[in-house]
């Protein structure tokens, strides 16, 4: 039994540490997953709680894992793990039955599990945690109580600071398909003989208060009375999903320039802002200024957004605005706005809005240049 408890302690501790760490590397990704669940259960009003709940969850998981693995306040760590597993095991069973969101997000974007796989993982963890919980009375302190608390508090503070660093800048480890060095076209390919997912891309336009869906074959390209609202991608038939499967860039004039950008052998800087209304005005202004400087320096500059036509009009400034699916933009960059430099379809680098000075230096662009 002693060996079984030791095995359970090691596995449980490592799983909780790993789960908390990969979420803390990408706090916004964890927040997006909470938002997906809120949306799926018609709790969209709670969307603002996504980020705070993400921080609470992954910090709790990480410290619980550290406690169980190191033995520091292990009894409290075991009780914490027991409470978490009692909450998430029935929850993941419901998710497996209803499948409102295909990927649980329990290991962030580092490891993708289906809802049934997540439920199975939780059943195994539940068994090991019950073994630890049943023997909790025999747990002894590793150090004196005060010293153990001090160590755990220091570890917690360091972990939270690490999480905020990843939030302010970009994740220190990029688990997403748009990492630096990626050749986008290569990630879009489907192996020969394998059936790809089939998507229907639709465009929402509005006219006199009426919203209507159009396809690429019938959208009102020449009818200016229709105003673009948003672009949507809908899965028609499930198949092999390439790492990058929904990357499209369409100008506000409804011209698909995706291939042209990916074939361009010169540098192109993409300013990614999923929603213009959700970004700070100063950050947008700094980005627009950078765009003007890029153009004067011979660098192509595009603004990719999922904002509607009315929002885009508020920022019309001579720069090229393009429409891209919101989920794609969130996957490309965990920053609003953020910047992606590509050349010949290869991602050269990525930067958050906090790193404009570094980006300017790299591109050898002086600030405060305007037309």
Image: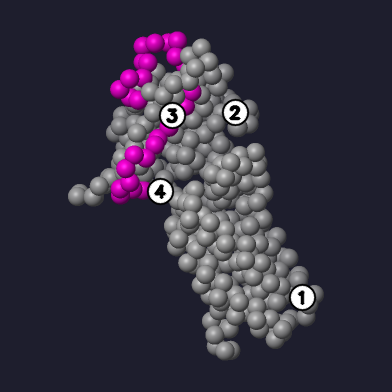
Q: Is the residue marked by circle 3 packed among few (<14), some (14-19), or many (20+) residues within 10 Å?
A: many
Q: CA distance from mark 2 to mark 3?
A: 17 Å
Which residue matches tag 4? 177
Which residue matches tag 2? 277
Q: Residue at x 62, y 66 (%)?
A: 86
Q: Is the residue marked by circle 4 packed among few (<14), some (14-19), or many (20+) residues within 10 Å?
A: some
| Location of residue 147 in the rendering, given as x and y in whole percent from the top left corner | 77, 75
Q: Is residue 224 magenta?
A: yes
Q: Quadrant of the N terminus?
A: bottom right
Q: Secondary structure at mark 4?
A: loop
The reply to whether callout 2 and callout 4 are in contact (CB within 8 Å) is no
The color scheme shown is one colour
| Location of residue 240 in the rendering, given as x and y in whole percent from the top left corner | 30, 49
Instruction: Report the magenta residues as a range.
Output: 215-243
Q: Residue at x 63, y 57 (%)?
A: 57
Which residue matches tag 1? 147
Mark count: 4
Q: CA distance from mark 2 to mark 4?
A: 26 Å
Q: Main secondary structure of the magenta part?
A: loop
Q: Secondary structure at mark 3?
A: strand
Q: CA distance from mark 3 to mark 4?
A: 21 Å
Q: Earlier in the sequence, mark 1 or mark 4?
A: 1
Q: CA distance from mark 3 to mark 1?
A: 56 Å
Q: Earlier in the sequence, mark 3 or mark 4?
A: 4
Task: Inspect this view and state whether residue 331 appears.
Answer: yes
- The vertical placement of 244 against 221, above or below, is below
| Location of residue 91 in the rendering, given as x and y in whole percent from the top left corner | 57, 58
Q: CA distance from mark 1 to mark 4?
A: 43 Å
The reply to whether callout 1 and callout 4 are in contact (CB within 8 Å) is no
Q: Quadrant of residue 248?
A: top left
């Amino acid at each position: 039994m002693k060996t079984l408890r030791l095995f359970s302690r090691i596995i449980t501790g490592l799983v909780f540490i790993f789960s908390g760490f990969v979420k803390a590397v990408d706090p916004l990704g964890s927040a997006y997953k909470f938002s997906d669940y809120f949306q799926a259960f018609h709790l969209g009003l709670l969307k603002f709680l996504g980020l705070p709940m993400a921080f609470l969850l992954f910090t709790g998981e990480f410290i619980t894992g550290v406690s169980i693995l190191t033995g520091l306040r292990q009894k409290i760590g075991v009780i914490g793990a027991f409470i978490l597993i009692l909450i998430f095991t029935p929850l993941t069973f419901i998710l497996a039955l209803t499948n409102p969101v295909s990927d649980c997000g329990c290991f962030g974007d580092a490891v993708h599990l289906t809802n049934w796989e997540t439920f199975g993982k939780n059943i195994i963890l539940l068994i090991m945690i019950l073994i630890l919980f049943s023997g909790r009375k025999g747990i002894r302190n590793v150090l004196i109580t005060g010293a153990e608390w001090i160590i755990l508090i220091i570890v917690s503070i360091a972990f939270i600071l690490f999480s905020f660093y990843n939030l302010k800048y970009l994740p220190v480890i990029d688990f997403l398909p748009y990492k630096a060095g990626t050749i986008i076209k290569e990630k879009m390919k489907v192996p020969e003989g394998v059936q790809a997912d089939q998507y229907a891309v639709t465009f929402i336009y509005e006219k006199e208060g009426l919203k209507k869906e159009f396809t690429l074959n019938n959208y009102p390209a020449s009818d200016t009375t229709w105003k673009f609202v948003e672009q949507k991608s809908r899965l028609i038939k499930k198949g092999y999903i390439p790492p990058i499967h929904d990357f499209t860039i369409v100008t506000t004039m409804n011209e698909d320039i995706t291939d042209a950008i990916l074939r361009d052998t010169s540098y192109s800087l993409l300013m990614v802002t999923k929603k213009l209304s959700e970004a700070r005005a100063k950050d947008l202004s700094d980005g627009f200024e950078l765009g003007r400087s890029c153009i004067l320096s011979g660098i192509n500059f595009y603004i990719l957004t999922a904002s509607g036509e009315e929002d885009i009009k508020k920022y019309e400034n001579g720069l090229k605005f393009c429409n891209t699916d919101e989920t794609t933009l969130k996957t490309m960059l965990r920053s609003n706005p953020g910047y992606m430099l590509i050349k010949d379809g290869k991602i050269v680098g990525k930067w958050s809005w906090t790193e404009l000075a570094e980006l300017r230096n790299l591109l050898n662009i002086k600030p405060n240049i305007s037309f």
